[in-house]
Image (cartoon, rainbow, N blue to C red):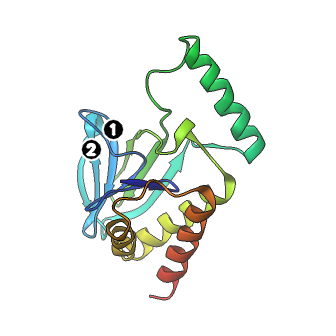
Amino acid sequence: MAMVGLFWITEDSVYLGAEPEGNASGVRLTKDGVELLGRERTGFRTWGEVHGIEVADVAVRRAVRRHASLAFDVVSGMLGQGPGYPPSFTVHVTTDHKTVTASPFTAITGGIYGPTEYELSLTLLRRLVDGGGTGLDDLLTWRRDHATAATPGREERELLLLKWVGDQGRR
């Protein structure tokens, strides 16, 4: 499994935020639709039912501020004052009938995204919604091709997001 932007990609699933364990909240994206998992489990919505997916409460900071925040978290953790769980963010899935909400954990270490990676993630998410999930195969294929590799560095993640956004724009 690997994190690219707001997406956690396993060999067979794409999650918005970290892959949930147990009753943790999660949002799974499939070629057929969107599924909210965990405590907020509200079922499955087909792409045809989904009009929008919005994210909120995501920590976004430039590199210097991000590194300072991470350093503070490390020191706090060493003093036993760190949080027990990674930070979460809010996901709103809108359909004709209602908006359902989930609060998945962030997938990135420290829970803080860079502005470029965050904006590219939002663009990819909008394209996935507009295209009815078209493009998820690109993410899954990349993960299968890199099954033994760890999460790529920031620059490579941004390049992957640019590629996926561009690929979807041509379909």
Percent position (x, y) of residue 101?
39, 43
Q: Residue at (27%, 44%) from the top-left corner?
A: 37
Of the two numbered discs 1 and 2 on the same chain, state the one appearing first in sequence: 1
Check disc 1: other Cα within 10 Å, few if <14, some if 14-19, many if 20+. many
Residue occupied by mark 1: 25
Which is nearer the eye, 29 or 140?
140
**Residue at coordinates 59% horizontally, 70% vertically from top-left?**
159
Q: Residue at x 56, y 19 (%)?
A: 77
Q: CA distance from mark 1 to mark 2?
A: 6 Å
- Residues at circles 1 and 2 in contact by the CB criterion of under 8 Å: yes
Give the percent coordinates (x, y) of residue 28. 31, 54
Q: Residue at x 68, y 54 (%)?
A: 115
Q: Residue furthest right?
A: 64
| Residue 37: numbered disc | 2
In the rendered structure, which amino acid carries the disc numbered 1? Ser
Above or below for 131 versus 129: below
Residue 46 place in picture, x, y as percent = 26, 65
Compare residues 83 and 98 and report the one nearer the observer.
Answer: 83
Side (left or right) of 111 relative to 65: left
Relative to 34, residue 64 above or below: above
Which residue is farthest bottom?
170
